[in-house]
Image (cartoon, rainbow, N blue to C red):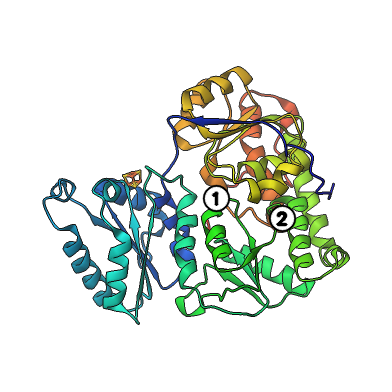
Amino acid sequence: MNDLSPTGCTNAPVLRERGQHEVFCGLTGIIWLHRKMQDAFFLVVGSRTCAHLLQSAAGVMIFAEPRFGTAILEEGDLAGLKDANDELDREVARLLDRRPDIKQLFLVGSCPSEVIKLDLARAAERLTDIHAPHVRVLNYSGSGIETTFTQGEDACLASMVPGLPATDAHNLLLVGALPDVVEDQARDLLDRIGLPQVSVLPAPRADGAPSVGPNTRYALLQPFLGDTSAALDRRGATRIDAPFPFGEEGTTLWLKAVAAAFGIAPEVVDRVTEAPRARARKAVAAAAETLSGKRITFLPDSQLELSLARFLTRECGMEAVEVGTPFLHGPIMAPELALLPGGARLSEGQDVDKQLDRVRADRPDITVCGLGLANPLEREGLTTKWAIELVFSPVHFYEQAGDLAGLFARPLRRKAILSGAPSLRCSSNMPGSGAEPRRVP
Ligand code: SF4
């Protein structure tokens, strides 16, 4: 199973669609990013709609000290009648006065700030001049006009790269925000392989920001970090080519690619990972009883689609009917495409009505899609899985492989139980069986 020969879908045609798309905007990333960066504050420069999105999506954190907020642009601002910059400066001054714990302030652009062409890059420079060295002010866009929901993280991390300290050291950088417990698992595996010095972007605190330079090798933890990858390349760092650490196979290949970049033999990885690989295989097999032989379609949403299709086809016995992704970043996804079994229809971008027509014609056993499309499809008797759950749940590396497979098995089991099919009863030893997906701690 563990080969990377350039076959699979490497040369498969890709249907490129540029029509109406139905996805969450990049503001969504704030919900998991603010938990990773403990001295950061995300100030959305947007409308009441943006504030409602954040408050309802992050409602679970209502009792925590908030590390995000919205500077509301009123109708007058939108009509260009007021100087929004002066108001922004006043709001930032008030915020930083009240919250001396804030060391990094992200001004997050939204649809309204895009529409009135508020120059948040210039605002961030001006505010850094005012509040340095105590606070660094950065900016990125989470606007739904130009981003899908995982691009918010990419844009945020990319905005940090130019300010990272420089180094000539041969160092390893992991890139992507994972739940702390999963990040610890990755560090532990790398430590046992012989790589104890690992830094991570984003770091938990501004003063722990990783260094980067011409001898930095970096490994992406998420497939949606194309802009961050390009920014690191501009700093002279080199990306380690690998599939993503989803499932037993993806995790092993990812670890072997990282090990090889530092001259460590694959046999070392095999030896260190023997026990967790066996655990992952066992956990995945329990869910694969439900998934094997089932057909799956991914509508473009999270940018995890190709990696998950690879995991579900190769480790769970599913058949990928269509794998849609908002963007297909060729160089980053090449290892995944090489592994994805041929026969899947690949699509990039979205034209939602045409895509729904194809789903209706294909009638897959399960469709992975955004919240807005799930209910209409369920009403038509099609089983769905919310793509956003895949980003909010811990799904990387060996110990989560069974939970990842379980996220897809659950809706199928539920449907089978509702329709009275006896062959798909819930397996009592399946990890995560019957439980709601866990949120990022
Ligand atoms: S950024 Fe745009 S899409 Fe996102 S909540 Fe605000 S108005 Fe809506």
Q: Amino acid at mark 2?
A: Ala
Residue 368, position in %: x, y? 57, 35
Q: Which residue is mark 1?
A: 391
- Residue nearest the viewer, comparing 436 with 209: 209
Q: Quadrant of ligand 1?
A: top left
Marks 1 and 2: in contact by CB < 8 Å?
A: no
- Residue nearest the viewer, comparing 270 with 201: 201
Disc 2, SS:
loop
Whether residue 69 is visible: no
Q: Which residue is mark 2?
A: 242
Residue 24 image-quadrant placement:
top left
Whether residue 392 is visible: yes
Name which of mark 2 and mark 1 comes first in the sequence. Answer: 2
Tag count:
2
Q: Amino acid at mark 1?
A: Val
Residue shown at the point (35%, 48%) measured from the top left: 53
User: Is residue 327 positioned above or below 63 on the image?
Assistant: above
Residue shown at the point (22%, 72%) measured from the top left: 93
Residue 294, position in %: x, y? 72, 29
Residue 278, position in %: x, y? 83, 56
Residue shown at the point (28%, 45%) measured from the top left: 49
Q: Nearer the viewer, mark 2 or mark 1?
A: 2
Residue shown at the point (38%, 44%) measured from the top left: 144
User: Is residue 71 positioned above or below 318 on the image?
Assistant: below
Q: CA distance from mark 2 to mark 1?
A: 20 Å
